[in-house]
Amino acid sequence: MHKEVTHPIIQHKLTILRNERTKHKEFREIVSEITMLLTYEALKHVGLREVEINTPVAPTVGYEVSHDIVVVPVLRAGVGMLNSVCEIMPTARTGFIGLYRDHDTKMPVEYYSKLPESSDDALVLLVDPMLATGGSTSAAIDMIKRAGFEQIVVLSIVAAPDGIEVVEAAHSDVNIYCAAIDECLNDDKYIVPGLGDAGDRLFGTI
């Protein structure tokens, strides 16, 4: 399942991201803000358990998240989304996956993986601003599943239809949340209209 989150505030902020005149400081801030809104949507149906507490006035029953939340950014651009997820879920554990796309084959190449130990109630949020061909995202999901995790949600800011199709074909059990589903991929496998290279724009390495 995939969901395009078309909230007006997200769409407003997405326009700032797309603008080629937006500098890296503002770009990084907006990525963080959109991620927070996407995380809110992605966790809308997260499991809860009852807890008994005392307010200053009386005892009552409240709720706390029952899942073990794990956030996994895909290096390097996914790092720009990490802190926002942790602001919403400060107890989340963190893993890292390093993948790059081979210039000639356009296929993902793994170069780093450090994931926490899996647990029965773990829910992994895989974060990467761009879901283009779907190759890197599918490879990252494979790595996470091999580590023993079963419940995985993908958070991307901009996605291409081709990439969504690839991920859903390989991992029908994984839900995808994004701020926009764009038109297509160009010959260089960049999303059109997209927002350029998210990593370069996040870290000022253009």
Image (cartoon, rainbow, N blue to C red):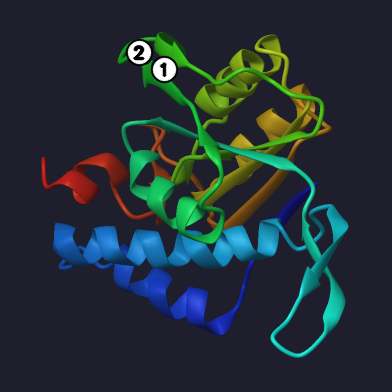
Residue 58 image offset from top left, x and y in percent:
82, 86
Residue 4 is left or right of residue 113, and the answer is right
Q: Which quarter of the picture shows residue 145?
A: top right
As drawn, 192 above or below 120: below
Q: Secondary structure at mark 1?
A: loop
Residue 34 image offset from top left, x and y in percent:
46, 65
Residue 76 is left or right of residue 95, and the answer is left
Q: Nearer the viewer, residue 60 or 120?
A: 60
Label of residue 106 in the image: 1
The type of residue carrying mark 2 is: Asp
Disc 2 + disc 1, Cβ < 8 Å: yes
Disc 2/disc 1 C-alpha distance (Å): 5 Å
The type of residue carrying mark 1 is: Lys
Residue 186 image offset from top left, x and y in percent:
41, 39
Residue 14 image offset from top left, x and y in percent:
41, 69
Residue at 44% over, 25% down: 96
User: Which residue is the site of mark 2?
Assistant: 102
Q: Which quarter of the picture shows residue 121?
A: top right
Looking at the rendered image, the quarter that the C terminus falls into is top left
Residue at 16% over, 57% down: 24
Q: Secondary structure at mark 2?
A: loop
